[in-house]
Image (tube, grey):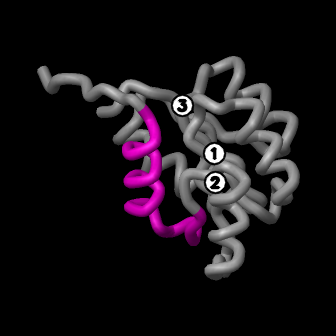
Amino acid sequence: MYQISVVIAQKESVVAERLAHALRARFRNVAVAHSNSELHDAIAKGRAKAAIVDLELVKLNELRELCEDFRGTAVVATHRAPDEQMWKACMEDGASDCCHPEEIDVMLRAIVSSTPISRAHAA
């Protein structure tokens, strides 16, 4: 298990809960935010080192601000139909990656490669 906190902000609560369920087995703490302001609060309060952010909830200019405000947090943008242009814009704004919300392996790779993390040893 990775000893970091992750915040999930998705427009659709069903998607957010599905992601949270999948990530709780891999990360120490997983929180769900329902708005851009909740996202900022959750990252700051939980000292989250990763955030998974829906581009239908947080617009590109807000994504850029998020990445600037939380430089130590790996931000993975998601969208229901990401394309190369969207990916490029997200990367230019400071995101670690941009993918479909069901691509959990892509999210994990982006978080692990962007964040100094440690694993807990199994007892």
Find residue 47 and report its image quarter: top right
Amino acid type, label 3: Lys
Q: Mark 2 points at which residue?
A: 16
Image quadrant containing the N terminus: top left
Q: Mark 3 points at which residue?
A: 49
Q: Residue 31, image x and y in percent?
A: 61, 35
CA separation in Å, label 1 and label 3:
12 Å
Look at 66% across and 40% down and name the residue there. 32
CB under 8 Å between discs 2 and 1: yes
Q: Residue 35, image x and y in percent?
A: 84, 44
Q: Name the residue under label 1.
A: 8
Q: Residue 10, image x and y in percent?
A: 71, 55
Question: In terms of secondary structure, what is the magenta stretch mainly?
Answer: helix
Find residue 49 and report its image quarter: top right
Mark 2 or 1: in front is: 1
Q: Which of marks 1 and 3 is nearer the N terminus?
A: 1
Look at 82% across and 41% down and name the residue there. 65
Look at 78% across and 26% down and name the residue there. 41
Mark 1 or 3: in front is: 3
